[in-house]
């Protein structure tokens, strides 16, 4: 756990640093930053010349499927997938079996992660019992047990009254609320974005209004209660506009989008490609442009994968019955680096949305390499070219719309508490 990283381009927005610099980590903690630091005999050295060194990347929205759905993913395989993607920390959603709505499940996740995970795993508890949207879970107990946020992700809290109470209660105990904003009545039997492609394929569509209406409700509730609110996986131009306007008038709202929403359109579904089926669905070119614009102007605070592994048998079926979701931990960094190449974000901006901001939203002591901070580091090779191949993914599931794509940029090393947990071949 003693490490010297030499000669890399250190990009740390928390300190305003973008410079060639060495980092020394001792006993899992950042000891010193500087030029020409010298390693002691017991220190491992990484030569990072030509590489980008950042605070450990944080994915604040993943599904590890453990407990209960380990045939899709488990904490060990999910954490290895995260490490391969350059993530040193992940926040895992509560839609497990049983749902993480009590201390016992939270403790199980934390204990298993302590024994089996190669990255930091931060549990997210449920907003409502069983995520059924009927009564609030014991949020105080969940926080005490180690949850960093609450969410019914995968399901919206349909009752406005219940969502109001959740925001008020969460504000009182100081835990983040993450909303899956979706109007189920507008979704109906829709399975992809409503529009030309859905009509061409003869599939029922989901209108953009299903997301926008729910985002607007949640934003107004946050404004009314004065409570912080985080909106998960936004995908529409309307959602970005609503959140942008809310921030301008002082509402305490943050949001995230996922790489597929600024990379793909609903045309990826052509051929009834179930690996392009997700919730919210892929949208239009206009929405893709809106996601990039919202990242550029700071409306979107975080990039999160919504890593959602599914077994082949749940995807290799008719489109209407295939489950929603894709794996994303191992492709996120490459897809996000393209934003820098396109001039949407600079490197500081990218590190902010993939490390610093998620840490702030979740209230975890990560996202910085200040001396005294935990020694979680991601070392990026921005020029590394690689092919997305199912057999090379660390995730137990392979449901990615990016299979066969050539990617540019990857994690050369992933370091957790001073220990190398992933090294690119």
Image (tube, rainbow, N blue to C red):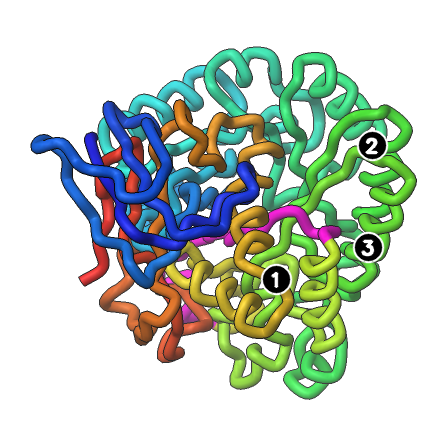
| Residue density around tag 3, few if under 14, some if 14–19, many if 20 or more, within 10 Å | many
Residue 212's spot in the image, x, y percent? 82, 55
**Mark with earlier residue (1, 3):** 3
Judged left or right of residue 308, residue 209 is: right
Q: Residue at x 29, y 41 (%)?
A: 415
Q: Residue at x 45, y 51 (%)?
A: 19
Q: Which residue is mark 1?
A: 345
The span from disc 2 to disc 3 (Cα, nearest Å) is 15 Å
| Residue density around tag 2, few if under 14, some if 14–19, many if 20 or more, within 10 Å | many
Give the image quarter of residue 319.
Answer: bottom right
Q: Nearer the viewer, residue 378 or 74?
A: 378
- Does dot 1 land on a helix, a strand or a loop? loop
Q: Nearer the viewer, residue 331 or 196?
A: 331
Is residue 299 a member of the stretch shown in magenta?
A: yes
Give the image quarter of residue 263.
Answer: bottom right
Which span of residues is magenta-colored? 298-317
Q: In this rendering, is residue 280 above or below 152?
A: below
Q: Which label is found at residue 222?
A: 2
Q: Residue at x 43, y 73 (%)?
A: 402
In this view, the residue farthest toward the bottom is 200
Q: Residue at x 50, y 77 (%)?
A: 273
Q: Which residue is mark 3?
A: 212
């Amino acid at each position: 756990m003693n490490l010297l990283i030499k000669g890399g381009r250190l990009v740390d927005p928390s300190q305003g640093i973008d410079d060639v610099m060495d980092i020394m980590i001792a006993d899992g903690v950042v000891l010193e930053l500087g030029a020409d630091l010298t390693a002691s005999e017991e220190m491992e050295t990484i030569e990072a010349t030509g590489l980008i060194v950042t605070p450990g990347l944080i994915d604040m929205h993943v599904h590890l499927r453990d407990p209960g759905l380990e045939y899709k993913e488990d904490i060990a395989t999910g954490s290895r997938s995260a490490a391969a993607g350059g993530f040193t920390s992940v926040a895992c959603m509560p839609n497990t079996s049983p749902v993480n709505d009590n201390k016992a499940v939270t403790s199980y996740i934390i204990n298993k992660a302590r024994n089996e995970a190669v990255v930091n795993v931060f549990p997210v508890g449920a907003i409502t019992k069983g995520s059924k949207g009927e009564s609030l879970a014991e949020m105080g107990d969940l926080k005490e047990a180690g949850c960093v946020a609450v969410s019914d992700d995968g399901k919206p809290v349909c009752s406005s009254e219940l969502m109001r109470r959740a925001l008020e209660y969460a504000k009182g105990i100081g835990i983040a609320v993450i909303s899956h904003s979706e109007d189920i009545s507008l979704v109906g039997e829709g399975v992809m974005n409503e529009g030309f492609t859905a009509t061409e394929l003869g599939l029922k569509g989901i209108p953009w209004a299903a997301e926008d209406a729910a985002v607007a409700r949640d934003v107004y509730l946050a404004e009314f209660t004065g409570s912080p609110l985080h909106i998960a996986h936004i995908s529409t131009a309307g959602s970005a506009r609503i959140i942008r306007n809310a921030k301008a008038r002082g509402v305490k709202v943050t949001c995230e989008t996922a790489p597929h929403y600024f990379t793909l359109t609903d045309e990826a579904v052509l051929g009834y490609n179930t690996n392009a089926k997700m919730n919210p669905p892929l949208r239009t070119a206009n929405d893709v442009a809106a996601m990039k614009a919202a990242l550029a102007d700071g409306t979107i605070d975080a990039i999160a994968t919504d890593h959602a592994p599914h077994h082949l048998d749940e995807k290799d079926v008719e489109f209407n019955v295939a489950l929603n979701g894709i794996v994303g931990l191992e492709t996120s960094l490459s897809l996000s680096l393209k934003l820098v190449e396109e001039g949407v974000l600079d490197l500081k901006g990218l590190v902010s949305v993939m490390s610093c901001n998620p840490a702030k939203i979740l209230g975890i002591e990560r996202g910085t390499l200040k001396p005294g901070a935990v020694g979680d580091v991601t070392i990026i090779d921005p020029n590394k070219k690689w092919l997305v191949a199912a057999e090379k993914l660390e995730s137990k599931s392979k449901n990615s719309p990016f299979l066969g794509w050539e990617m540019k940029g990857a994690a050369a090393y992933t370091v957790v508490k001073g220990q190398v947990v992933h090294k690119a071949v």
